[in-house]
Image (spheres, helix red, strand yellow):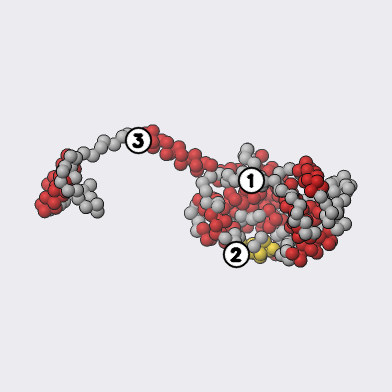
Amino acid sequence: MEGNGKGPAPNPEWSRMQAALLRRKPDLKGNTLEQYELASRDLTGYDPRVMTQDDVDRVRANIMGARRGNGPRVIIVCIRAILRHVYGRGDLILKAPRYKRPSNHALEVEQIGRMLAVDVDDPLRNAVGRLLYEGSLRVGEVCRLNVEDFNFESREVLLRDAKTGNQVVSVPQAAMDAVAEYVKNHRPSEFVDGGGRAAFVSRNTKRRIGEKFVRYQVKRSARLSGVTNRVYPHLVRATSITHLLNAGANPATVQRHARHARIETTWVYNRPTQGMQRENLDAGWAKIHGAKPQPRRTHEDALRELAQDFVDKKISFADLKRTQELLEQHAPGSTQAKPPRDVSYQ
């Protein structure tokens, strides 16, 4: 069953499914429930109580053919949870495709600088871009910001309903100045659908900006600045955390700034950028190819250096005799006892 040519129609059983899911997982948030609701639409026209494995395979084939990227995986995982937790159909096999990891190569500082420079004349894009990078904000956190969430004096931003609950994050002065410039001088004065509290409002719709706007802005900035990497909002956040760690910032401070529940998550970003890898490898190869072989130090060299140290009065005569005896014991071809392992004559 189709719904106005925009995909499957809403499932009439959704209210029952939602109640059962919330009983099973009471901590489900709104955005997650939206994914479950979209997944339930692919079950429209089927009775999960009597579905066969052929029906499940048919549903999976339709999902794989209609969606791209990681969309099929998310929908299939939600459908599998509905079948198991709502209808008790653990006997049905619904295998989710493997997660397609996006490129995790952090951008270079110079690339990020070019992207921010592209939007410097657009107050809205400039403020959003700087919060994504210098505030390490997630795309949803940016969209949910209200005007009262900014403390311009202390340079702090209150993030409501963040992934790890309500959090306060500090941002650099440049990012806060960009936000203040937009809010005070360029934010639309007319709003629609509660846009009056939103910090960032679309000039065209007069509504709060959405994730689609932010994603398009990031891609646009990358394209106009000549960045050929595949760039998306979370890559900008990951780049921010990587740059902080590479600059020597305290990992615990970075963890708090990034709102990670565990320090292990923060350490994932402790990696060199592609440019840093190239520089380090080039330096290593230059050292390898440019280094001259050092002559091997012989037994006679050691005796000569020892005698010179005695002449220069760096060692006493007793030390000279004792060290000479150790050298003779350790000389090539010597049949005398070797010195103890903790004694070094070099």
Q: Do the residues labelled 3 and 2 touch (CB within 8 Å)?
A: no
Which sits in the foreground, 251 or 64? 64
**Label 3: few (<14), some or many (≥20) within 10 Å?**
few
Q: Which amino acid does label 3 sit on?
A: Ala
Q: Residue 128 in the image: x percent, y percent? A: 67, 52
First reached walking from the N terminus: tag 1 or tag 2: 1
Q: Residue 176 in the image: x percent, y percent? A: 63, 57
203 left or right of 125? Answer: right
Which sits in the foreground, 252 or 224? 252
Dot 1 falls on a residue whose secondary structure is loop
Q: Do the residues labelled 3 and 1 touch (CB within 8 Å)?
A: no
Residue at x 67% of width, y 61% of height:
162
Name the residue that disc number 2 marks.
154
Name the residue that disc number 1 marks.
101
Dot 3 falls on a residue whose secondary structure is loop
Q: What residue type is labelled 2?
A: Ser
Q: Residue 122 in the image: x percent, y percent? A: 69, 48
Quadrant of residue 183 within the rendered picture: bottom right
Tell me, yes or no, if residue 135 can be seen here.
Answer: yes
Mark 3 → mark 1, Cα distance in angstroms: 41 Å
Quadrant of residue 216 within the rendered picture: top right
Q: Do the residues labelled 1 and 2 touch (CB within 8 Å)?
A: no
Q: Mark 1 vs mark 2: give the one in front.
A: 1
Q: Residue 5 in the image: x percent, y percent? A: 87, 45
Q: Which amino acid does label 1 sit on?
A: Arg
Mark 1 → mark 2, Cα distance in angstroms: 37 Å
Residue at x 43% of width, y 39% of height:
283
Mark 3 → mark 2, Cα distance in angstroms: 53 Å
Q: Mark 3 vs mark 1: give the one in front.
A: 1
Name the residue that disc number 3 marks.
291
First reached walking from the N terminus: tag 3 or tag 1: 1
Dot 2 falls on a residue whose secondary structure is loop
